[in-house]
Amino acid sequence: MFRATLLTLFPAMFPGPLGQSLAGDALARGLWACETRDIREHGLGKHRAVDDTPAGGGFGMVMRADVLAASLDAAAAADDARPKLVMSPRGAPFTQRQAREWAAGPGLVILCPRFEGVDERVIAGRGLIEVSIGDYVLSGGEIAALAILDACVRLIPGVMGKEESGHEESFETGLLEYPQYTRPREWEGRAIPDILLSGDHAKIAKWRRAEAERITRERRPDLALDLPRP
Ligand code: SAH
C-alpha cells in the first residue's frame, strides 16, 4: 500500500482536501494511508523550539537539522524504502512523470518546512530529495505536499476507474489536452464543433490531436519542441 508520512508543524492540515472526493474515498477504502508527525514533538527545551536564527545573520528563522533529523528518524526506520522529500522552491520541478514513478512505489515521507527553510546539513545527512511545485513562494511545505500527494494518489491502481485511468491526459502524451464539450449542443450562441457530432471516430481523433498540438504550441512552446511543424 502507498503510505504517506507528513512531517509538519501543522498536522491538522492533513489529509485536508485529500480526505474528500477521489483521494478521500481511496483513503477510506484503504488504498493509501496518510500519517502525520508533529515536528514539534522533537522540539528542544521548554518551548519545544524547532528553529533558530540563520548562521551568518539575515532575515527569518531556519529549521534545525537536529530536530528535523530526530523527527525523520522516528517517522521512517533505516530500512524504509520510501523516498524522503523536502518541499523547497529551489527543488527539482515536480512533474507528471515523477508522480507516475512515486505512485507505483511504497509511498513517500514528506518534510514540510516553514520559515526560511531547513538547515542545509539535514538534506545531505538524511538523503532528502528537494522538490518544488512551481516557480513561486508558498508560506510552507504543506500545500506543496498536498499537491504532490494528490497527483500521486489518483494514479494508484484502483483509485480511478479503469476507463479514466487508461485515458491519456495532459502531459502524459507530451501534449496539453484538446477542448472538451458536453450538452447542450448550443449554449449562449456557441455551438459544439460539428465534427464532434459527426460520429466519425477517426476524424474526431484526428481533430483532437490537431487541437492538442495547436494548444500546446500556443501555450507551452517549451513542451511543443518535438512537434512536427504545422
Ligand atoms: N526562503 C525560501 C522560501 C521559504 S518559503 C527561499 O527563498 O527559497 C517556506 C517553505 O515553503 C519552504 O521551505 C518550502 O518548504 C515551502 N515552499 C515554498 N514555495 C514552495 C514551492 N514552490 N514548492 C515547494 N515548496 C515550497
Image (cartoon, rainbow, N blue to C red):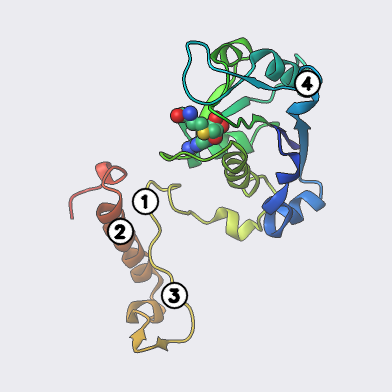
Judge from the rendering whether residue 12 lies leftward or rightward of residue 186; answer left or right: right
- Residue 218 in percent (x, y) is at 25, 56
Q: Sequence order check: which comes first, mark 3 or mark 2? A: 3
Q: Sequence order check: which comes first, mark 2 or mark 1? A: 1
The quarter holding residue 203 reads bottom left
Residue at x 81%, y 20% (from the top left corner): 46
Q: CA distance from mark 2 to mark 4?
A: 49 Å
Q: Sequence order check: which comes first, mark 4 or mark 1? A: 4
Q: Which residue is mark 3?
A: 181
Q: Which residue is mark 4?
A: 42
Is the CB of mark 3 within 8 Å of ligand 1? no
Q: Mark 4 against mark 1, which lies toward the viewer?
A: 4
Q: Is residue 94 visible?
A: no
Q: Mark 2 against mark 4, which lies toward the viewer?
A: 4
Q: Are marks 2 and 1 in contact (CB under 8 Å)?
A: yes
Residue 175 numbered tag: 1
Along the viewing direction, whichever of 7 and 169 lies nearer the viewer: 7
Q: Mark 4 against mark 3, which lies toward the viewer?
A: 4
Q: Is residue 184 visible?
A: yes
User: Is 9 situated above or below 184?
Assistant: above
